[in-house]
Amino acid sequence: MKTKRFNPSHPLLNWVLRRGRDVLAFQVYQDRTGYEVAVSAPGRPTQLYSRLCAEGRNALQLHAALVADFRDDGWTSIAYR
C-alpha cells in the first residue's frame, strides 16, 4: 500500500472556487521535503492536478496563477483560508 506524502486534512492554503454547479479546491500542502499544489473536486477520491515544488515561494506563485486563471475564466471564489 502506498502512503500519501502530504496530509490532505491540513493544507497551508485552501481556496474553493465555483462556476455553476462545479466546485474545485485549490490547495497547498507542506511536508519536510517540499510543497504540493493540488486541485481537486470535493467528494472525488483523486486529485485533478498535482505538482510538487521544492520551495514555498514557487508553490504559492503556482497556486496564485492557477486561481487567477480560473477566476479569469468565470470561476468565483466562495471560500479561502
Image (spheres, rainbow, N blue to C red):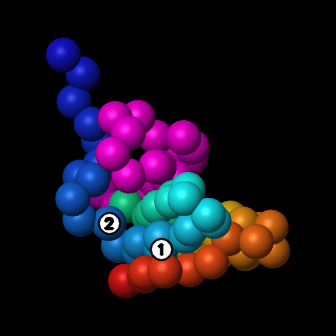
Q: Nearer the viewer, residue 47 or 54?
A: 47
Amino acid on which disc 1 is placed = Trp
Q: Position of residue 29 (x, y in %)?
A: 37, 61
Q: Can residue 37 be seen by looking at this rendering? A: no
Q: Nearer the viewer, residue 56 or 66?
A: 66
Q: Position of residue 12 (x, y in %)?
A: 35, 73
Nearest to the eye among marks 1 and 2: give it: 1
Does residue 48 appear to the left or right of 6 in the view shown? Answer: right
**Is residue 7 within the magenta segment?**
no
Q: Can residue 74 be seen by looking at this rendering? A: yes
Q: Position of residue 39 (x, y in %)?
A: 52, 53
Rendered image quadrant of residue 61: bottom right
Residue for point 21% across, 59% down: 9
- Mark 1, residue position: 15
Write the start and end of the magenta stretch as one range: 30-56
Q: Position of residue 80 (x, y in %)?
A: 42, 82
Quick check: 64 above or below 49?
below
Amino acid on which disc 2 is placed = Pro
Rendered image quadrant of residue 11: bottom left
> What quarter of the picture does the N terminus occupy?
top left
Quick check: 38 above or below 77?
above
- Mark 2, residue position: 11
